Image (cartoon, rainbow, N blue to C red):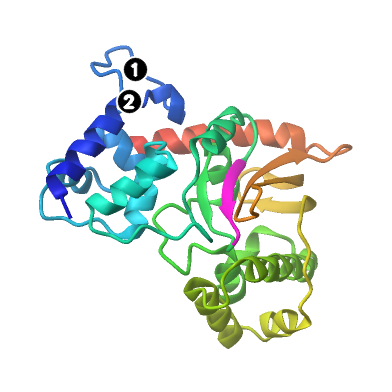
Amino acid sequence: MDLPELGAFLRSRRDRITPEQVGIVPGPRRRVPGLRRDEVAMLAGASVEYYIELEQGSKVQPSPQMLAALSRALRLTGDERNHLYRLAGRPVPARTGDTHVEPAMLALLDRLDDTPALIVSDLAESLVANDMARALLGERRGLTWPRTSQVYRWFVEDESRDIHPPEDHARLSESLVADLRLAAGRRAPDDARLRELVELCTAASDEFTRLWEERTVKLRRVDAKVFLHPSIGTLDLLCHNLHTDDGSQHLLWFTAREGTDSGERLALLRVVGAQSMTAGDAR
């Protein structure tokens, strides 16, 4: 563990990233070419004070979850991410089931600024999302495992289903469990996170237990979903998926279904999302 070097490494990576690369509009009086400390903290879901302590090389040892968030915020490559973990004295995560997002996939996400889009792990964890996705799905930054997984929230926290109409719940449950079965086939038999997720959902939900025991597997490429947004109303959307070669992650984005007014509602959602982000910055 080398916390002073960790702080220096974070500063060097922060200076390298421009605001435009992470979707931040630079102000007219900007004094630095790279990101400011408060911007990195916001992107990583940390407090500014905590991030400043990290850069100063204090005795604060970041958790693996925070290191993963910093890696995404700073667009670190796989080698840079591994170096960050070693400096923090944390084990480098195994590649299988990794939550690190390569910069190339993040760059593709950055181009999808006019539609909700996010990058999701094979355990249904939202790794990084654009503003419109957060406006549609709600803020998920700051959640800790296992609540980071949509599978857990869907089968354990009933209120998480309110975003979809009740008549769609059974189909969405089937899809989530079929996806998770595929992940189980790719991961090691003793994968701790997968085992914990299945145990928690089995204990909480008879529906999950039944679907899990059916052993249905299906990779979703295109799906239709109806969202009940508290401000925008009903959105009838197509859900598209672009999977990595190993299937451990996928880029997910939404488009309006033909013959609906959801295109206009998505345009309105973009305005609502921008207003929410502005209000959040003000707070």
Query: 240 and 271: which one is in front?
Result: 240
- Asked if residue 283 can be seen in this view, the reply is no
Numbered tag placed on residue 203 in the rendering: none
Label 1 sits on what residue type? Answer: Gly
Mark 1, residues whose alpha carbon is within 10 Å: few (<14), some, or many (≥20)? few
Identify the residue under disc 2: 16
**Residue 113 among magenta residues:** no
Q: Quadrant of the N terminus?
A: bottom left
Identify the main secondary structure in magenta: strand
Instruction: Name which of mark 1 and mark 2 comes first in the sequence.
Output: 2
Mark 2, residues whose alpha carbon is within 10 Å: few (<14), some, or many (≥20)? few
What's the residue at 27%, 53% (across, down)?
Answer: 86
Query: 276 and 110: which one is in front?
Result: 110
What's the residue at 30%, 42% (across, down)?
Answer: 41
Identify the residue under disc 1: 27
Which span of residues is magenta-colored?
Answer: 117-122
Secondary structure of the residue carrying tag 1 is: loop
Residue 214 location (% of width, % of height): 78, 81
In front of the other: label 1 or label 2? 2
Residue 268 location (% of width, % of height): 64, 33
Label 2 sits on what residue type? Answer: Arg
Question: In the figure, 150 relative to 82: above or below?
Answer: below
Q: Is residue 144 left or right of residue 200?
A: left
Residue 206 location (% of width, % of height): 67, 86
Secondary structure of the residue carrying tag 2 is: helix
The alpha-carbon separation of the residues under discs 1 and 2 comes to 18 Å
What's the residue at 54%, 58% (across, down)?
Answer: 125
**Residue 121 among magenta residues:** yes
